[in-house]
Image (cartoon, rainbow, N blue to C red):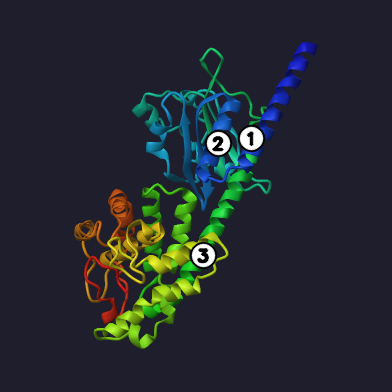
Amino acid sequence: MDYNFHVQVLHDAADVLKGLLEIGVNLSSVADRRQMLDMILSEARNLARAEAGSLYVHRNGRLRFVAAQNDRLGGGALSSVFLGKEIPTTSESLAGFVASTGRVVNIPDAYNLSGDWPFRINRAFDQASGYHTQSILAIPLRCPDGACVGVLELLNRLEPDGTVAPFPPAEGSGILSLASMAAVTIHNALLQEDLKQAHLDTIIRLSVVVEHRDNATAQHIRRISRTARLLAEALGLDRRQAELIECAAPMHDIGKVGIPDHILHKPSTLTPEERQAVQQHTLIGADILGHPQNDLIALAHDIALSHHERWDGEGYPTGLAGEAIPLAGRIVCLADVADALLSERCYKHAYSAETVRDILVSERGKQFDPAVVDAFLEVEDRILDAYRAAADEPEPTRVTAAHHAPAGTCAL
């Protein structure tokens, strides 16, 4: 073997190893899931000199398209078409074949695919965008135990002169080592998501114990939780803040555990004294959640105390107004009212989306923070998805006078 060539090979291998170590350190320090997925794809493309690429996460027998990059078209062109889409893990698609078999697939020319493969290349995107997919390298993202947690697809290897060439064999290039690191990173991220979901489910189940005394259901709590997160995101809160509000929102009425049943379930109109007693649930909830030891309970405390305050200062328990009301309380206030209006009750039909929109807009700057109303209008379609899905499943509730709040005002 030529000495100079041998030295160059060693230098190249050292560069790859150094790059992989840097990637591993960077991946371990990234907390945001979206940023982590984009980093995996970007580093894989750099290592393989790929003009474009995509990343799938494999869960529950399906592949979810989670990241897309294309230097020629820009990421937006791919993202708008594919991100969030799911396909089954079957051999009919390239990604499905790779995930189901665990095989690396290296295709020199996607338009001259050998008939030996069971899948076909979907050329619809090329036809719609004018892009030409030529060489493809598809790699399963396998954990040490052999489980496939995703698929990495790299498109069009670029030579120094800009021409497209086939990808070299994946073995020995460092790309398989990167794929292994990516698999472990994604696996850990999925475990964290499962833990967060279990945490939220526990909070919701505990909140249901309280809410069942007041004729609510788990779905009511889940909808408020989801709406609160969508509103938080529309208001520009970061992912961690939005997740905290999503998890804290189910505890907004936890103080009702301290209200006597004979008042909560009274079948006739409440007296002023009884109504005042019901309003104490905000203070009771804040007391239950007092002296918080973590950010979640601290936020739940603020929500429980403030979600019946009004932007105009006419709410309770302390008559806070405007931005003196914690933002999370302002968010859950609207989410709670919107759910009461949009949901079927035995004493009323669900209000139409148009009617609810009119009510919320009419209370803009009165009961509700104008910015939160604007956020609702921005994500209204996404909020309404949960109510459309439940349209044929009315919630079984008992009628009590305590729940007959005027349209546009928070229920007790």
Q: Residue at x 43, y 81 (%)?
A: 258
Q: Secondary structure at mark 1?
A: helix
Q: Secondary structure at mark 3?
A: helix
Choose between 190 and 280: the one closer to the eye: 280
Q: Of callouts 2 and 3, which one flags the residue occurring earlier in the amino acid sequence?
A: 2
Question: x and y percent of residue 374 in the render?
Answer: 28, 50
Task: Report whether residue 172 is seen.
Answer: no
Question: As drawn, is 405 to the left or to the right of 260?
Answer: left
Question: x and y percent of residue 123 in the render?
Answer: 40, 30
Residue 308 is labelled as none
Task: Check contact, mark 2 vs mark 1: CB within 8 A.
Answer: yes
Q: Secondary structure at mark 2?
A: helix
Question: Residues under labels 2 and 1: Cα distance?
Answer: 9 Å
What amino acid does circle 1 point to? Ile
> Residue 137, relative to residue 60: is it above or below?
above
Q: Residue at x 46, y 48 (%)?
A: 238
> Residue 211, relative to residue 127: is it above or below?
below
Q: Residue at x 58, y 27 (%)?
A: 46
What amino acid does circle 2 point to? Met
Q: Of callouts 1 and 3, which one flags the residue occurring earlier in the amino acid sequence?
A: 1
Q: Of callouts 2 and 1, which one flags the residue occurring earlier in the amino acid sequence?
A: 1
Task: Report whether residue 170 is seen.
Answer: yes
Q: Residue at x 53, y 63 (%)?
A: 199
> Residue 37, relative to residue 124: is it above or below?
below
Q: Residues within 10 Å of mark 3 (few under 14, many from 20)?
A: many
Question: x and y percent of residue 356 in the render?
Answer: 23, 60
Residue 39 is labelled as 2
Residue 23 is labelled as 1
- The residue that label 3 is drawn on is 297
Q: Residues within 10 Å of mark 2 (few under 14, many from 20)?
A: some
Task: Check contact, mark 1 vs mark 3: CB within 8 A.
Answer: no
